[in-house]
Image (spheres, grey):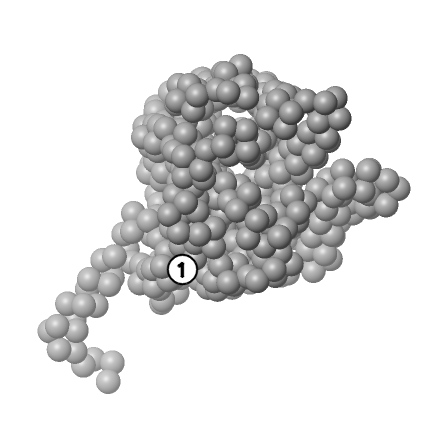
Amino acid sequence: MSGTRGPPGEEEEHRTMRKWRANPWAVLVTLSLGFFMTLLDLTIVNIAIPDMMDGLGASLGQTLWTVSGYALTLSALIITASRLGDLRGPRNLFAVGLAVFTLASLACGLAPTPTALIAARVVQGLGAALLTPQTMTLIVAVFPAERRGTAMGIWGMVAGLATLSGPTLGGFLVSALDWRWIFLVNLPIGVAALVLTFLVVPDIRPGRAHRFDLPGVLLSTGALFCIAFGLQEGESYHWGAGIRALLAAGAALAAGFLLHQRRRQAGEPLVPFALFHDRNFTAMTALVGLVSVAMLGLVLPFNLYLQSVLHLSAMKAGLVLAPSSLVSMTVGPFAGRLADRIGGKSLLLFGLTCYTAGIITIAVIASPASAWYAFVPATLLTGLGVGCIIAPMSTEAMRFVPRHLAGAASGINNTVRQIGSVVGAAAVGALLESRLAAEIATGKTYAAAFTATLHTTVILPVAVLIAGALVCLLLRPRPAPTAAAPADGKQTAAAG
Protein backbone atom coordinates (compact mmCIF):
# COMPACT_ATOMS: atom_id res chain seq x y z
CA MET A 1 0.00 0.00 0.00
CA SER A 2 1.25 3.46 -0.87
CA GLY A 3 0.73 4.86 2.65
CA THR A 4 2.56 2.06 4.47
CA ARG A 5 5.91 2.95 5.99
CA GLY A 6 8.75 0.48 5.75
CA PRO A 7 10.93 -0.63 8.67
CA PRO A 8 13.10 2.11 10.25
CA GLY A 9 16.28 0.66 8.74
CA GLU A 10 14.75 0.65 5.28
CA GLU A 11 13.56 4.24 5.68
CA GLU A 12 17.05 5.30 6.76
CA GLU A 13 18.54 3.57 3.71
CA HIS A 14 16.09 5.37 1.45
CA ARG A 15 16.95 8.72 3.04
CA THR A 16 20.66 8.04 2.49
CA MET A 17 20.03 7.10 -1.13
CA ARG A 18 18.03 10.31 -1.71
CA LYS A 19 20.78 12.36 -0.05
CA TRP A 20 23.48 10.98 -2.35
CA ARG A 21 21.30 11.20 -5.44
CA ALA A 22 20.63 14.85 -4.68
CA ASN A 23 24.36 15.55 -4.16
CA PRO A 24 25.82 17.08 -7.34
CA TRP A 25 29.39 16.39 -6.20
CA ALA A 26 28.66 12.65 -5.94
CA VAL A 27 27.24 12.85 -9.45
CA LEU A 28 30.40 14.62 -10.63
CA VAL A 29 32.64 11.91 -9.14
CA THR A 30 30.62 9.21 -10.90
CA LEU A 31 30.66 10.99 -14.25
CA SER A 32 34.37 11.70 -13.90
CA LEU A 33 35.17 8.00 -13.42
CA GLY A 34 33.60 7.11 -16.76
CA PHE A 35 35.00 10.15 -18.54
CA PHE A 36 38.47 9.46 -17.13
CA MET A 37 38.52 5.95 -18.61
CA THR A 38 37.54 7.08 -22.10
CA LEU A 39 40.29 9.71 -22.31
CA LEU A 40 42.86 7.53 -20.54
CA ASP A 41 42.45 4.98 -23.32
CA LEU A 42 43.41 7.57 -25.94
CA THR A 43 46.96 7.82 -24.59
CA ILE A 44 47.62 4.77 -22.42
CA VAL A 45 48.03 2.64 -25.55
CA ASN A 46 50.92 4.78 -26.82
CA ILE A 47 53.32 3.63 -24.13
CA ALA A 48 52.57 -0.04 -24.89
CA ILE A 49 53.06 0.14 -28.67
CA PRO A 50 56.48 -1.62 -28.70
CA ASP A 51 55.22 -4.41 -26.40
CA MET A 52 52.01 -4.88 -28.40
CA MET A 53 54.01 -5.09 -31.63
CA ASP A 54 56.21 -7.82 -30.13
CA GLY A 55 53.42 -9.67 -28.32
CA LEU A 56 51.00 -9.80 -31.25
CA GLY A 57 53.47 -9.72 -34.13
CA ALA A 58 51.83 -6.50 -35.33
CA SER A 59 53.20 -3.86 -37.69
CA LEU A 60 53.50 -0.22 -36.67
CA GLY A 61 50.57 0.63 -38.94
CA GLN A 62 48.36 -2.02 -37.31
CA THR A 63 49.34 -0.86 -33.84
CA LEU A 64 48.61 2.77 -34.69
CA TRP A 65 45.13 1.64 -35.68
CA THR A 66 44.54 0.56 -32.08
CA VAL A 67 44.85 4.27 -31.30
CA SER A 68 43.10 5.80 -34.28
CA GLY A 69 40.37 3.13 -34.60
CA TYR A 70 39.22 3.95 -31.10
CA ALA A 71 39.38 7.70 -31.65
CA LEU A 72 37.71 7.38 -35.06
CA THR A 73 34.68 5.53 -33.70
CA LEU A 74 34.42 7.89 -30.76
CA SER A 75 34.49 11.01 -32.92
CA ALA A 76 32.19 9.63 -35.63
CA LEU A 77 29.38 8.65 -33.23
CA ILE A 78 29.51 11.25 -30.49
CA ILE A 79 26.99 13.65 -32.06
CA THR A 80 24.61 10.73 -32.56
CA ALA A 81 25.07 9.69 -28.93
CA SER A 82 24.34 13.20 -27.67
CA ARG A 83 21.00 13.17 -29.49
CA LEU A 84 20.22 9.67 -28.19
CA GLY A 85 20.80 11.07 -24.71
CA ASP A 86 18.14 13.69 -25.39
CA LEU A 87 15.79 10.94 -26.56
CA ARG A 88 16.37 8.26 -23.92
CA GLY A 89 17.81 10.23 -21.02
CA PRO A 90 21.51 10.97 -20.46
CA ARG A 91 21.80 8.67 -17.45
CA ASN A 92 20.58 5.68 -19.45
CA LEU A 93 23.03 6.36 -22.30
CA PHE A 94 25.84 6.90 -19.80
CA ALA A 95 25.10 3.52 -18.19
CA VAL A 96 24.89 1.69 -21.53
CA GLY A 97 28.14 3.31 -22.63
CA LEU A 98 29.88 2.23 -19.42
CA ALA A 99 28.72 -1.37 -19.87
CA VAL A 100 29.83 -1.53 -23.52
CA PHE A 101 33.18 0.13 -22.76
CA THR A 102 33.92 -2.19 -19.83
CA LEU A 103 33.08 -5.38 -21.76
CA ALA A 104 35.11 -4.18 -24.74
CA SER A 105 38.06 -3.52 -22.40
CA LEU A 106 37.90 -7.17 -21.38
CA ALA A 107 37.90 -8.18 -25.06
CA CYS A 108 40.95 -5.94 -25.69
CA GLY A 109 42.82 -7.54 -22.82
CA LEU A 110 42.14 -11.03 -24.17
CA ALA A 111 42.67 -10.24 -27.90
CA PRO A 112 44.75 -12.99 -29.59
CA THR A 113 45.56 -11.11 -32.84
CA PRO A 114 46.06 -7.51 -34.03
CA THR A 115 42.75 -7.68 -35.94
CA ALA A 116 40.86 -8.81 -32.85
CA LEU A 117 42.44 -6.03 -30.81
CA ILE A 118 41.52 -3.37 -33.38
CA ALA A 119 37.92 -4.68 -33.51
CA ALA A 120 37.64 -4.60 -29.71
CA ARG A 121 39.04 -1.07 -29.69
CA VAL A 122 36.35 -0.02 -32.16
CA VAL A 123 33.68 -1.38 -29.79
CA GLN A 124 35.43 0.44 -26.95
CA GLY A 125 35.08 3.62 -29.01
CA LEU A 126 31.35 2.96 -29.36
CA GLY A 127 30.98 2.71 -25.57
CA ALA A 128 33.03 5.87 -25.09
CA ALA A 129 30.89 7.71 -27.65
CA LEU A 130 27.69 6.75 -25.82
CA LEU A 131 28.86 7.95 -22.41
CA THR A 132 31.12 10.94 -23.11
CA PRO A 133 28.59 13.62 -24.19
CA GLN A 134 26.24 12.70 -21.34
CA THR A 135 28.82 13.86 -18.78
CA MET A 136 28.62 17.54 -19.75
CA THR A 137 24.83 17.36 -20.14
CA LEU A 138 24.38 15.97 -16.64
CA ILE A 139 26.81 18.46 -15.09
CA VAL A 140 24.86 21.36 -16.59
CA ALA A 141 21.62 19.78 -15.34
CA VAL A 142 22.61 19.07 -11.72
CA PHE A 143 24.82 22.07 -10.90
CA PRO A 144 23.36 25.55 -10.39
CA ALA A 145 24.86 28.31 -12.52
CA GLU A 146 26.95 29.77 -9.68
CA ARG A 147 28.75 26.44 -9.10
CA ARG A 148 28.85 25.20 -12.68
CA GLY A 149 32.17 26.89 -13.44
CA THR A 150 33.92 25.06 -10.59
CA ALA A 151 32.32 21.75 -11.62
CA MET A 152 33.38 22.20 -15.24
CA GLY A 153 36.85 23.13 -14.03
CA ILE A 154 37.14 19.81 -12.17
CA TRP A 155 35.71 17.99 -15.19
CA GLY A 156 38.30 19.67 -17.37
CA MET A 157 41.03 18.76 -14.90
CA VAL A 158 39.97 15.12 -15.15
CA ALA A 159 40.29 15.38 -18.94
CA GLY A 160 43.83 16.74 -18.71
CA LEU A 161 44.85 14.28 -16.02
CA ALA A 162 43.54 11.31 -18.01
CA THR A 163 45.33 12.40 -21.17
CA LEU A 164 48.65 13.00 -19.45
CA SER A 165 48.62 10.14 -16.94
CA GLY A 166 48.05 7.51 -19.63
CA PRO A 167 51.76 7.03 -20.39
CA THR A 168 52.72 6.93 -16.70
CA LEU A 169 50.03 4.44 -15.67
CA GLY A 170 50.53 2.47 -18.87
CA GLY A 171 54.28 2.29 -18.30
CA PHE A 172 53.78 0.90 -14.80
CA LEU A 173 51.26 -1.71 -15.94
CA VAL A 174 53.33 -2.82 -18.95
CA SER A 175 56.53 -3.14 -16.91
CA ALA A 176 55.04 -4.69 -13.77
CA LEU A 177 52.47 -6.95 -15.43
CA ASP A 178 51.82 -7.07 -19.17
CA TRP A 179 50.54 -4.77 -21.94
CA ARG A 180 47.11 -6.43 -21.69
CA TRP A 181 46.61 -4.85 -18.27
CA ILE A 182 46.34 -1.38 -19.80
CA PHE A 183 42.85 -2.57 -20.83
CA LEU A 184 42.03 -4.92 -17.96
CA VAL A 185 42.56 -2.12 -15.44
CA ASN A 186 39.30 -0.61 -16.74
CA LEU A 187 37.21 -3.50 -15.41
CA PRO A 188 37.01 -2.56 -11.69
CA ILE A 189 36.68 1.15 -12.54
CA GLY A 190 33.89 0.46 -15.04
CA VAL A 191 31.95 -1.79 -12.65
CA ALA A 192 32.25 0.73 -9.81
CA ALA A 193 31.12 3.60 -12.04
CA LEU A 194 28.16 1.57 -13.33
CA VAL A 195 26.96 0.79 -9.79
CA LEU A 196 27.35 4.43 -8.74
CA THR A 197 25.44 5.58 -11.83
CA PHE A 198 22.23 3.95 -10.60
CA LEU A 199 22.87 4.95 -6.98
CA VAL A 200 23.60 8.67 -7.33
CA VAL A 201 22.91 9.97 -10.86
CA PRO A 202 19.37 11.33 -11.37
CA ASP A 203 17.39 10.22 -14.41
CA ILE A 204 17.08 13.59 -16.15
CA ARG A 205 14.51 13.59 -18.93
CA PRO A 206 13.56 16.32 -21.40
CA GLY A 207 10.22 17.98 -20.85
CA ARG A 208 9.20 17.39 -24.46
CA ALA A 209 9.63 14.69 -27.07
CA HIS A 210 12.64 14.73 -29.38
CA ARG A 211 12.99 13.40 -32.89
CA PHE A 212 15.95 11.47 -34.26
CA ASP A 213 17.61 12.90 -37.37
CA LEU A 214 18.66 9.70 -39.18
CA PRO A 215 19.87 11.40 -42.42
CA GLY A 216 22.00 13.80 -40.37
CA VAL A 217 23.48 10.92 -38.39
CA LEU A 218 24.38 9.00 -41.55
CA LEU A 219 25.91 12.05 -43.24
CA SER A 220 28.01 13.07 -40.23
CA THR A 221 29.21 9.53 -39.50
CA GLY A 222 30.15 8.95 -43.14
CA ALA A 223 32.00 12.26 -43.40
CA LEU A 224 34.01 11.70 -40.23
CA PHE A 225 34.88 8.13 -41.17
CA CYS A 226 36.08 8.99 -44.69
CA ILE A 227 38.20 11.92 -43.53
CA ALA A 228 39.76 10.13 -40.57
CA PHE A 229 40.44 6.92 -42.49
CA GLY A 230 41.97 8.86 -45.37
CA LEU A 231 44.28 10.79 -43.05
CA GLN A 232 45.33 7.70 -41.12
CA GLU A 233 46.04 5.47 -44.10
CA GLY A 234 47.24 8.14 -46.57
CA GLU A 235 50.92 7.48 -46.01
CA SER A 236 50.45 3.70 -46.30
CA TYR A 237 48.87 4.14 -49.74
CA HIS A 238 51.30 6.89 -50.80
CA TRP A 239 48.42 9.40 -50.94
CA GLY A 240 47.19 7.77 -54.14
CA ALA A 241 43.97 8.30 -56.07
CA GLY A 242 41.93 6.13 -53.71
CA ILE A 243 42.92 8.13 -50.63
CA ARG A 244 42.32 11.43 -52.41
CA ALA A 245 38.89 10.19 -53.52
CA LEU A 246 38.07 9.14 -49.95
CA LEU A 247 39.04 12.55 -48.57
CA ALA A 248 37.01 14.26 -51.29
CA ALA A 249 34.02 12.06 -50.43
CA GLY A 250 34.42 13.00 -46.77
CA ALA A 251 34.46 16.70 -47.65
CA ALA A 252 31.36 16.28 -49.85
CA LEU A 253 29.50 14.42 -47.10
CA ALA A 254 30.49 17.11 -44.59
CA ALA A 255 29.13 19.81 -46.91
CA GLY A 256 25.94 17.78 -47.36
CA PHE A 257 25.61 17.43 -43.58
CA LEU A 258 25.91 21.20 -43.07
CA LEU A 259 23.31 21.90 -45.77
CA HIS A 260 20.98 19.33 -44.21
CA GLN A 261 21.45 20.90 -40.79
CA ARG A 262 20.77 24.35 -42.21
CA ARG A 263 17.35 23.17 -43.41
CA ARG A 264 16.57 21.71 -39.96
CA GLN A 265 17.43 24.74 -37.84
CA ALA A 266 13.75 25.49 -37.25
CA GLY A 267 13.23 21.95 -35.94
CA GLU A 268 15.69 19.84 -33.96
CA PRO A 269 19.08 19.83 -35.67
CA LEU A 270 21.97 17.70 -34.50
CA VAL A 271 24.07 20.89 -34.63
CA PRO A 272 22.10 23.99 -33.62
CA PHE A 273 23.82 26.86 -35.42
CA ALA A 274 22.57 29.22 -32.70
CA LEU A 275 25.33 27.88 -30.43
CA PHE A 276 27.92 29.47 -32.69
CA HIS A 277 26.41 32.93 -32.26
CA ASP A 278 28.32 32.83 -28.96
CA ARG A 279 31.87 33.81 -29.91
CA ASN A 280 33.31 32.26 -26.76
CA PHE A 281 31.69 28.86 -27.38
CA THR A 282 32.90 28.92 -30.98
CA ALA A 283 36.45 29.88 -30.00
CA MET A 284 36.68 27.29 -27.22
CA THR A 285 35.30 24.55 -29.43
CA ALA A 286 38.03 25.31 -31.99
CA LEU A 287 40.63 25.39 -29.21
CA VAL A 288 39.50 21.98 -27.91
CA GLY A 289 40.33 20.45 -31.30
CA LEU A 290 43.67 22.22 -31.57
CA VAL A 291 44.80 21.18 -28.09
CA SER A 292 43.82 17.56 -28.82
CA VAL A 293 46.00 17.62 -31.95
CA ALA A 294 48.88 19.07 -29.94
CA MET A 295 48.64 16.47 -27.17
CA LEU A 296 48.75 13.51 -29.56
CA GLY A 297 51.41 15.31 -31.61
CA LEU A 298 53.74 15.32 -28.60
CA VAL A 299 52.88 12.20 -26.60
CA LEU A 300 53.21 9.59 -29.37
CA PRO A 301 56.66 10.51 -30.81
CA PHE A 302 58.13 11.40 -27.41
CA ASN A 303 57.09 8.05 -25.91
CA LEU A 304 58.61 6.18 -28.84
CA TYR A 305 61.80 8.25 -28.53
CA LEU A 306 62.17 7.45 -24.83
CA GLN A 307 61.82 3.71 -25.44
CA SER A 308 63.41 3.16 -28.85
CA VAL A 309 66.26 5.70 -28.66
CA LEU A 310 67.05 6.03 -24.94
CA HIS A 311 66.03 2.37 -24.35
CA LEU A 312 63.98 3.15 -21.26
CA SER A 313 61.52 0.55 -20.06
CA ALA A 314 57.83 1.37 -20.41
CA MET A 315 57.70 2.13 -16.69
CA LYS A 316 60.68 4.51 -16.77
CA ALA A 317 59.30 6.23 -19.88
CA GLY A 318 56.00 6.74 -18.08
CA LEU A 319 57.78 8.11 -15.02
CA VAL A 320 59.57 10.69 -17.17
CA LEU A 321 56.11 12.07 -18.01
CA ALA A 322 54.73 11.69 -14.46
CA PRO A 323 55.68 15.25 -13.37
CA SER A 324 53.47 16.61 -16.14
CA SER A 325 50.46 14.68 -14.83
CA LEU A 326 51.07 15.66 -11.21
CA VAL A 327 51.42 19.36 -11.97
CA SER A 328 48.35 19.34 -14.23
CA MET A 329 46.29 17.57 -11.57
CA THR A 330 47.37 20.08 -8.91
CA VAL A 331 46.88 23.21 -11.01
CA GLY A 332 43.60 22.23 -12.74
CA PRO A 333 41.06 22.89 -9.95
CA PHE A 334 42.70 26.22 -9.04
CA ALA A 335 42.68 27.26 -12.69
CA GLY A 336 38.95 26.50 -12.90
CA ARG A 337 38.15 28.69 -9.90
CA LEU A 338 40.51 31.45 -11.05
CA ALA A 339 38.82 31.48 -14.46
CA ASP A 340 35.52 32.28 -12.70
CA ARG A 341 37.14 35.34 -11.08
CA ILE A 342 39.36 36.85 -13.76
CA GLY A 343 38.08 35.18 -16.93
CA GLY A 344 39.71 32.44 -18.94
CA LYS A 345 41.56 34.44 -21.59
CA SER A 346 44.70 35.31 -19.61
CA LEU A 347 44.94 31.83 -18.10
CA LEU A 348 44.57 30.16 -21.48
CA LEU A 349 47.26 32.31 -23.09
CA PHE A 350 49.60 31.61 -20.15
CA GLY A 351 48.90 27.88 -20.38
CA LEU A 352 49.42 27.74 -24.14
CA THR A 353 52.71 29.62 -23.75
CA CYS A 354 53.95 27.19 -21.08
CA TYR A 355 52.91 24.14 -23.08
CA THR A 356 54.63 25.43 -26.23
CA ALA A 357 57.78 26.31 -24.30
CA GLY A 358 57.83 22.82 -22.76
CA ILE A 359 57.57 21.12 -26.16
CA ILE A 360 60.34 23.26 -27.64
CA THR A 361 62.54 22.49 -24.61
CA ILE A 362 61.99 18.75 -25.12
CA ALA A 363 63.07 19.08 -28.76
CA VAL A 364 66.17 21.09 -27.83
CA ILE A 365 67.26 18.57 -25.17
CA ALA A 366 66.57 15.43 -27.23
CA SER A 367 69.65 13.70 -28.61
CA PRO A 368 70.61 10.05 -29.11
CA ALA A 369 72.35 10.07 -25.71
CA SER A 370 70.25 12.46 -23.57
CA ALA A 371 69.83 11.67 -19.88
CA TRP A 372 66.21 10.96 -18.95
CA TYR A 373 66.24 13.38 -16.00
CA ALA A 374 67.14 16.27 -18.30
CA PHE A 375 63.52 16.23 -19.52
CA VAL A 376 61.93 16.72 -16.08
CA PRO A 377 61.88 20.57 -16.18
CA ALA A 378 60.29 20.44 -19.63
CA THR A 379 57.59 17.98 -18.54
CA LEU A 380 56.86 20.16 -15.49
CA LEU A 381 56.34 23.06 -17.87
CA THR A 382 53.99 21.09 -20.12
CA GLY A 383 52.00 20.00 -17.05
CA LEU A 384 51.63 23.60 -15.89
CA GLY A 385 50.47 24.54 -19.36
CA VAL A 386 47.86 21.78 -19.62
CA GLY A 387 46.59 22.53 -16.11
CA CYS A 388 45.99 26.14 -17.10
CA ILE A 389 44.35 25.20 -20.41
CA ILE A 390 41.90 22.35 -19.91
CA ALA A 391 39.76 23.63 -17.02
CA PRO A 392 39.26 27.23 -18.27
CA MET A 393 38.66 25.94 -21.80
CA SER A 394 35.83 23.64 -20.71
CA THR A 395 34.37 26.23 -18.33
CA GLU A 396 34.26 28.99 -20.93
CA ALA A 397 32.82 26.66 -23.56
CA MET A 398 29.79 25.57 -21.49
CA ARG A 399 29.25 28.27 -18.87
CA PHE A 400 26.45 30.17 -20.62
CA VAL A 401 24.99 27.41 -22.80
CA PRO A 402 21.22 27.16 -22.16
CA ARG A 403 20.28 23.90 -20.51
CA HIS A 404 18.04 22.79 -23.38
CA LEU A 405 21.06 23.04 -25.73
CA ALA A 406 23.52 21.37 -23.34
CA GLY A 407 23.30 17.97 -25.04
CA ALA A 408 23.97 19.40 -28.48
CA ALA A 409 26.76 21.64 -27.16
CA SER A 410 28.38 18.70 -25.37
CA GLY A 411 28.16 16.59 -28.51
CA ILE A 412 29.77 19.29 -30.65
CA ASN A 413 32.50 20.04 -28.12
CA ASN A 414 33.43 16.40 -27.59
CA THR A 415 33.20 15.61 -31.31
CA VAL A 416 35.71 18.34 -32.07
CA ARG A 417 37.91 17.05 -29.24
CA GLN A 418 37.93 13.57 -30.75
CA ILE A 419 38.36 14.82 -34.32
CA GLY A 420 41.44 16.61 -33.03
CA SER A 421 42.70 13.33 -31.57
CA VAL A 422 42.10 11.51 -34.86
CA VAL A 423 43.80 14.24 -36.88
CA GLY A 424 46.67 14.41 -34.38
CA ALA A 425 47.23 10.64 -34.41
CA ALA A 426 46.96 10.50 -38.21
CA ALA A 427 49.19 13.50 -38.83
CA VAL A 428 51.93 12.50 -36.41
CA GLY A 429 51.78 8.89 -37.59
CA ALA A 430 52.26 9.98 -41.19
CA LEU A 431 55.08 12.34 -40.19
CA LEU A 432 56.81 9.65 -38.15
CA GLU A 433 56.72 7.03 -40.90
CA SER A 434 57.73 9.36 -43.75
CA ARG A 435 60.45 11.32 -41.93
CA LEU A 436 61.96 8.24 -40.23
CA ALA A 437 62.26 6.47 -43.59
CA ALA A 438 63.83 9.57 -45.14
CA GLU A 439 66.33 9.99 -42.28
CA ILE A 440 67.34 6.31 -42.35
CA ALA A 441 67.80 6.54 -46.13
CA THR A 442 70.56 9.14 -45.55
CA GLY A 443 72.65 6.49 -43.75
CA LYS A 444 72.01 7.60 -40.17
CA THR A 445 71.78 5.12 -37.34
CA TYR A 446 68.27 4.40 -36.08
CA ALA A 447 68.82 6.46 -32.91
CA ALA A 448 70.09 9.48 -34.86
CA ALA A 449 67.33 9.09 -37.46
CA PHE A 450 64.56 8.92 -34.86
CA THR A 451 65.98 11.89 -32.95
CA ALA A 452 65.99 13.96 -36.13
CA THR A 453 62.44 12.78 -36.80
CA LEU A 454 61.37 13.93 -33.32
CA HIS A 455 62.85 17.37 -34.01
CA THR A 456 60.68 17.58 -37.12
CA THR A 457 57.44 16.20 -35.66
CA VAL A 458 57.35 18.70 -32.76
CA ILE A 459 56.75 21.41 -35.35
CA LEU A 460 53.17 20.08 -35.57
CA PRO A 461 52.09 20.62 -31.92
CA VAL A 462 53.97 23.92 -31.70
CA ALA A 463 52.24 25.30 -34.81
CA VAL A 464 48.86 24.10 -33.56
CA LEU A 465 49.33 25.72 -30.14
CA ILE A 466 50.30 29.03 -31.76
CA ALA A 467 47.05 28.84 -33.74
CA GLY A 468 45.26 28.15 -30.44
CA ALA A 469 46.72 31.30 -28.92
CA LEU A 470 45.40 33.32 -31.86
CA VAL A 471 41.96 31.76 -31.32
CA CYS A 472 42.06 32.83 -27.66
CA LEU A 473 42.47 36.45 -28.73
CA LEU A 474 38.89 36.26 -30.01
CA LEU A 475 37.54 35.74 -26.49
CA ARG A 476 35.68 38.67 -25.00
CA PRO A 477 34.40 39.35 -21.47
CA ARG A 478 30.99 37.92 -20.78
CA PRO A 479 28.23 39.43 -18.62
CA ALA A 480 27.40 37.82 -15.30
CA PRO A 481 25.55 34.50 -15.70
CA THR A 482 22.46 35.76 -13.87
CA ALA A 483 22.11 38.57 -16.37
CA ALA A 484 22.97 36.62 -19.48
CA ALA A 485 21.50 33.18 -19.17
CA PRO A 486 18.34 32.81 -21.23
CA ALA A 487 15.41 30.78 -20.11
CA ASP A 488 16.31 27.14 -20.23
CA GLY A 489 14.20 24.43 -21.70
CA LYS A 490 12.26 22.59 -19.05
CA GLN A 491 13.56 19.27 -17.85
CA THR A 492 12.23 16.85 -15.31
CA ALA A 493 13.93 14.19 -13.22
CA ALA A 494 12.26 10.83 -13.50
CA ALA A 495 12.36 8.49 -10.57
CA GLY A 496 15.55 6.54 -10.96
Element under disc 1: helix
Look at the image and tell me in which quarter the C terminus lies: bottom left
Q: Nearer the viewer, residue 24 or 250?
A: 250
Q: Position of residue 445 (x, y in %)?
A: 64, 25
Find residue 72 and report its horizontal and vertical position in percent.
64, 48
Residue 88 or residue 316, whichever sits in front: 316
Q: Is residue 396 visible?
A: no
Q: Position of residue 142 (x, y in %)?
A: 36, 49
Q: Is residue 420 visible?
A: yes
The quarter holding residue 479 reads top left
Relative placement, left or right, of 398 versus 447 is: left
* Picture coordinates of residue 23, whole percent (x, y): 27, 52
Residue 61 lies left or right of residue 164; in this view the side is right
Out of 9 and 424, give the one closest to the viewer: 424
Q: Is residue 441 above or below residue 191?
A: above
Circle 1 residues within 10 Å: few <14, some 14–19, many ≥20: some
Q: Is residue 223 left or right of residue 283?
A: right
Say whether residue 231 is left or right of residue 367. Answer: right
**Amino acid at dot 1:** Leu
The residue located at (31%, 63%) in the rendering is 199
Report the residue marked by disc 1. 187
Residue at figure coordinates x 62%, y 56% from the top left? 114
In the displayed structure, would residue 411 be above or below residue 146?
below
**Quarter holding residue 188:** bottom left
Q: Nearer the viewer, residue 390 or 406?
A: 390
